[in-house]
Amino acid sequence: MKPMGTIPADFAGAPLTIAGRSAADWVAMAGDTPLFIYDRGAVEARIARFRAAFPDIDLHYAIKANPFAALLAAMAPLVDGLDIASGGELTMALAAGKAPQTISFAGPGKRDDELTAAIKAGVTINLESSGEATRALGIGDRLGITPRLAIRVNPEIELRGSGMRMGGRASPFGIDADRAAAVARDVIASGADWRGLHIYAGSQALDAWAIIDTQAATMALAGRLAEEIGVMPPLVNLGGGFGIPYFPGEAPLDIAAIGAALAEALATRSTALRDTRFAIELGRWLVGEAGVYLTRVVDRKESRGETFLVVDGGLHHQLAATGNLGTVVKRNYPVSIATAAAGAPTEVVSVVGPLCTPLDRLADRVTLPVAAVGDLVAVFMAGAYGVSASPTAFLGHPLPAETLAEHS
């Protein structure tokens, strides 16, 4: 038997209820499994928690975490900006109704057609290199449009304990900190609409003090760069890095402590940042715990003393839950038998998907209520990096349904 993560508090009860309806009801309304359900109320509560902890900081949603159209439309009026990473995400962000000047476009390797679309739309481009700056300025000249440009900085610092380190090393992301000011001065001298700095050091951290230290170092770096540039940055995006507790033994992030420390850092910031706005860019922290992936048991089998529940969903929809999206050691996301009654007898089982690969394992030897063919399995922490970050074309299985759950 292996442990699994903790089911988020929004999804208590047996049988499982989501936004006031049973999992079986949601499946009946959708027509079939597999099904992703995103609890709108849980997302709105997260945004409210952020506002309480960071009253003077703008909130940006990184839509790569979950670009589901109905979710984006619901979140757009509740956040201050949307952060995108492709021309496709630009189309999604505009369709969600967000004003172009509140959208920022990061990511290396932006094609000329993407830069053109961004400049035409009026979104901010976070420049990842001096070459990209030259291309964006040239496109702006040809279009007769002044581009909105910011510098993404590759900082000397990294976010300790983060799941994905974005700073402190050679990187395709951003302009090295020791060169950023020179590129910024060139951009400003060209007549571009200077929009500021984007500094991102890492992601998926659960150590509040590591984030506090990183934010303090980021503020200091932003102040130094602003002095070197000689022009105040209108906005400094401090990045994000807020993690969520997927696995056994992990605890939720203390954002109140982070907010209090950042307020102190703001109060003592460099005079070169006196009138600068600051933003935090979050993805999974806003939506990750609000999602549930429902899949149906299609077979139950025994093999050499082990029991397997074979379900109709798997890594082609939930790559991260199978441990194949950046996880070195396989650990179990929280799962449940969504249709099981309270107090049902339990057994040790593995939950596996329908794909012809041993990697397709949603839960490895966990204790769950006894399940039969037709029962529903719920995989939690499914609101971020689910279907859009999974190999949906693998083996030709159909796409899952997705729905935004409104509380009844």
Image (cartoon, helix red, strand yellow):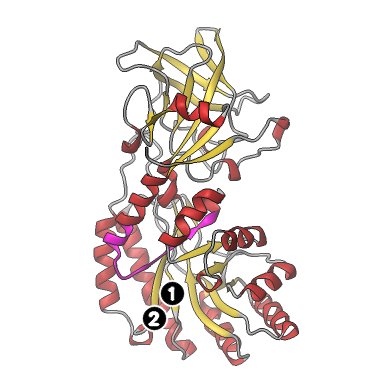
Residue 319 visible in the snapshot: no
Q: Look at mark 1 in the image and give the residue it sits on.
A: 236
Q: Amino acid at mark 1?
A: Val
Is 282 on the left or on the right of 169, as rendered? Answer: left
Name the image quarter holding the N terminus.
Answer: top left
Mark pair 2, 1: CA separation: 7 Å
Q: Which residues are magenta?
A: 50-63
Q: Look at mark 2 in the image and give the residue it sits on.
A: 276
Q: Residue at x 54, y 62 (%)?
A: 97
Please provide percent x and percent y for residue 179: 56, 80
Is residue 296 one of those drawn in magenta?
Answer: no
Element at badge 1? Answer: strand
Image mark count: 2
**Quadrant position of residue 233:** bottom left
Label 2 packing within 10 angstroms: few (<14), some (14-19), many (20+): some
Q: Which mark is residue 38?
A: none
Q: Nearer the viewer, residue 247 or 280?
A: 280
Task: Farthest residue to the front: give it.
Answer: 408
Q: Are marks 2 and 1 in contact (CB under 8 Å)?
A: yes
Please provide percent x and percent y for residue 251: 31, 42
Name the image quarter holding the C terminus.
Answer: top left
Is 291 on the left or on the right of 11, as rendered? Answer: right
Label 1 packing within 10 angstroms: few (<14), some (14-19), many (20+): many
Which tag, 2 or 1, sits closer to the chain's start?
Answer: 1
Q: Amino acid at mark 2?
A: Thr
Q: Residue at x 48, y 21 (%)?
A: 376
Q: Is residue 361 above or below residue 52?
A: above
Q: Nearer the viewer, residue 154 or 299?
A: 299
Residue 364 visible in the snapshot: yes
